[in-house]
Each structure stands twice: as structure tokens, then as C-alpha cells.
């Protein structure tokens, strides 16, 4: 797998499309244990990302990620805007100046992105947040690279791991974010942010598969 700047831009656009297709679903999930704005806010943010990507001359993938991160911070709002924004900003720093990325770069991006989310949100695995989808996906990526699996298989495993993580969020009580106000009453509901993280990984898998 090797993606150039325009491929990564197309991939981010695809992520935006998948968020748009699922905006009602994400919003319903957030309405059950939060304030019901996650899908709408994410969709709004990725729409602006798309416009900015099309109207900006972007030289490298680090710059592209920075643009996405700053735009999400400025437009999504709530908890997830700054968290996803930080993830893209930090992820982009791992590939500063690069005009092409491979699976090893993707691992570096994910590593920095997750560290950024944790630094900003102070959540760990098991707190019922986006981390519960992202961290298992990241572990699957690392394992797949160690085993020298083909990129598509690695991403398929990462997608599976993220989905298992989303399902796990149904079983646990939230310890971070708005859903934590409900405590034990948040059990039985899947986390909206973990779900949007899964959708992003799923979009990456579908993109590389095609
Ligand atoms: P808000 O709750 O401010 O309305 P969103 O609805 O956009 O924000 O996003 C909610 C999602 O953000 C949650 O489902 C959860 O996955 C994620 N989240 C909330 N707080 C944290 C945190 N401290 N660390 C990581 N993720 C978090
Ligand atoms: Mg919300
Ligand atoms: Mg909100």
C-alpha cells in the first residue's frame, strides 16, 4: 500500500461521505446517552474539510492532515471536535513533509493520533469512548505488519477489531464525556464516538480494498 497526497485527500473525502451516510445513526446513538449532536457535528465538520481540501493547494500529507485537524477543531465543536482535530494534527506531524505514505507510516499516524486523543481527553481503553475502537484497531495494525500480511488483510483485521471495540462499549459504563453523567445507566448503549471511529477505519479498509 502506498498513497500519494491526492489519494489521501480522496480517502478523507470518503470518510466524510461515510460520516454523512451515518449522520442520523451517530446522532441517535449520541441522543441515547449524550446530547444527540455527534453525527450532525461531524458531518458539518467533514463538509468544510471537503471544501477546504478542494480550494487549497496542499503540498504534502503532513499539511493535509493539519488542514483537516484545524478544520475539525474549528467546526465540529463539543468533545469530539477537539479530540478528532488533535488526532489529525498529531497524526500529520508523524508524516510531515511526506508526499507518499505506506502501512508503516499509517501506524505512526495512528500511534500519534491516539496519543493526542489521550493527552487531550485523558481517556483510556474501557472508558467507553472513541479510544475503545481506535486502540484495538491500532493493535491489529501493528500485529498485521509484524506478520507481514497484505495491506488489505491488515486493514480488514483492524476494522474487525474496531467493530469488536464498538460492541464492547455496549457492555461498559462511561467514565468520560457526557455519557459518564449517566454512570451505570449508560450500559447497554454503544458509544457514538467509538462508532464514528469504527466508520473511519471501515472507510479506510474499503478505500484500500477497491
Ligand atoms: P459532546 O458530548 O460534547 O456533544 P460529541 O457528541 O461530538 O461531543 O462526541 C461524543 C463522543 O466523544 C463520545 O461518544 C466519546 O466517544 C467521545 N469522547 C467524549 N469525551 C472523551 C474523552 N475525554 N476522551 C475520548 N473520547 C471522548
Ligand atoms: Mg454530543
Ligand atoms: Mg454536544
Image (tube, rainbow, N blue to C red):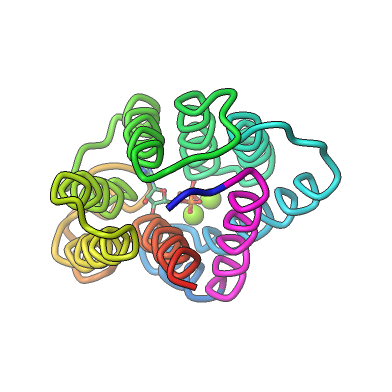
- Residue at 42% x, 43% y is 102
Q: Position of residue 38 (x, y in %)?
A: 52, 58
Whether the magenta-drawn stretch holds residue 71 is answered as: no
Stretch in magenta: 4-23
Up the image or down, 117 lies above or below 165; here it is: above
- Residue at 48% x, 58% y is 35
- Residue at 60% x, 34% y is 99
Up the image or down, 75 lies above or below 89; here it is: below
Query: Residue 156 versus residue 151: which sits nearer the camera?
Result: 151
Query: Residue 143 versus residue 192: which sits nearer the camera?
Result: 143
Q: Identify the image quadrant of residue 155.
A: bottom left
> Which SS type dominates the magenta stretch?
helix
Q: Position of residue 112 (x, y in %)?
A: 37, 29
| Left or right of 168 on screen, residue 56 | right
Q: Position of residue 62 (x, y in %)?
A: 58, 30
- Residue at 28% x, 60% y is 150
Whether the magenta-drawn stretch holds residue 11 is answered as: yes
Amino acid at each position: 500500500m502506498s498513497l500519494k497526497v491526492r489519494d489521501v485527500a480522496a480517502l478523507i473525502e470518503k470518510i466524510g461521505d461515510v460520516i454523512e451516510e451515518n449522520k442520523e445513526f451517530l446522532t441517535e446513538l449520541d441522543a441515547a446517552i449524550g446530547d444527540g449532536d455527534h453525527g450532525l457535528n461531524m458531518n458539518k465538520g467533514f463538509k468544510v474539510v471537503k471544501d477546504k481540501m478542494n480550494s487549497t493547494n496542499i503540498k504534502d500529507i503532513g499539511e493535509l492532515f493539519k488542514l483537516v485537524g484545524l478544520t475539525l477543531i474549528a467546526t465540529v465543536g463539543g468533545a469530539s471536535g477537539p479530540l478528532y482535530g488533535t488526532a489529525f494534527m498529531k497524526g500529520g506531524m508523524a508524516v510531515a513533509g511526506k508526499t507518499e505514505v505506506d502501512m508503516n507510516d499509517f501506524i505512526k499516524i495512528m500511534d500519534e493520533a491516539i496519543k493526542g486523543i489521550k493527552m487531550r481527553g485523558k481517556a483510556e481503553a474501557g472508558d467507553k469512548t472513541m479510544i475503545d475502537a481506535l486502540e484495538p484497531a491500532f493493535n491489529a495494525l501493528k500485529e498485521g505488519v509484524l506478520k507481514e500480511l497484505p495491506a488489505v488483510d491488515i486493514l480488514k483485521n483492524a476494522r474487525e477489531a474496531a467493530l469488536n471495540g464498538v460492541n464492547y462499549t455496549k457492555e461498559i459504563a462511561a467514565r468520560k464525556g457526557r455519557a459518564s453523567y449517566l454512570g451505570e445507566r449508560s450500559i447497554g448503549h454503544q458509544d457514538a464516538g467509538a462508532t464514528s471511529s469504527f466508520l473511519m477505519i471501515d472507510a479506510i479498509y474499503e478505500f484500500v480494498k477497491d
